[in-house]
Amino acid sequence: MSQPVTSGHLKHLHLAITTAVVIPIAFMYGFYPNVLFDLRPTTTDELNVYKAIMGLYIAFGGFWILGMLLPRFWQPATQSNMLFLFGLAAGRTLSMCVDGIPSVLFCLGTFGEYVLGFYALYQLSRQPIHPDEKRH
């Protein structure tokens, strides 16, 4: 039986890596979408969408930082991290099937999203169940 992960660097690895990637990418989407990616927004509405994505990414990154710093936030931060990563990976996988294969950066990102999403799931599975919760 696995021992619960209660401390140490590995417990926060998924949160740390995702935060370190997502926050800079947020600013790239929000202010410089064409620097790393072949994204060329031309309308105010398109720019607004990219700023909204930036805001979401920064908000999630901030929550994941809280999860690394405050133990009571670790589980919900990890759950949101897992959902965020699997949601992105699923959307990108759908796009690959429907739209074609994107740039190498997006392909690597998709792979990383799956890896870190499964790592978050693994870390959650190692945590003790709260006494008033039952595993179904």
Image (cartoon, rainbow, N blue to C red):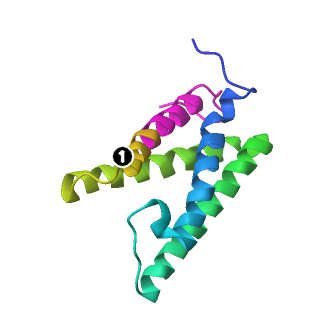
Of 46 and 3, the residue lying toward us: 46
Considering only vertical position in the picture, is 73 above or below 136? below
28 falls in the magenta region: no
Residue 56 in sight in this render: no
Boundaries of the magenta span: 113-136
Residue that extends furthest to the top in the rendered view of this protein: 1
Q: Which residue lies at the image location 56% right of the left edge and 58% below the top edge?
A: 25
In the rendered image, which residue does mark 1 sit on? 107
Q: Which residue lies at the image location 48% right of the left edge and 80% below the top edge?
A: 47
Of 55 and 44, the residue lying toward us: 44
Q: Tell me the kind of residue under disc 1.
A: Cys
Residue 106 is situated, as x and y percent measured from the top left of the image, at 39, 51
133 falls in the magenta region: yes
Residue 64 is situated, as x and y percent measured from the top left of the image, at 67, 49
Image quadrant in which you'd find residue 11: top right
Residue that extends furthest to the bottom in the rendered view of this protein: 44
Residue 77 in sight in this render: yes
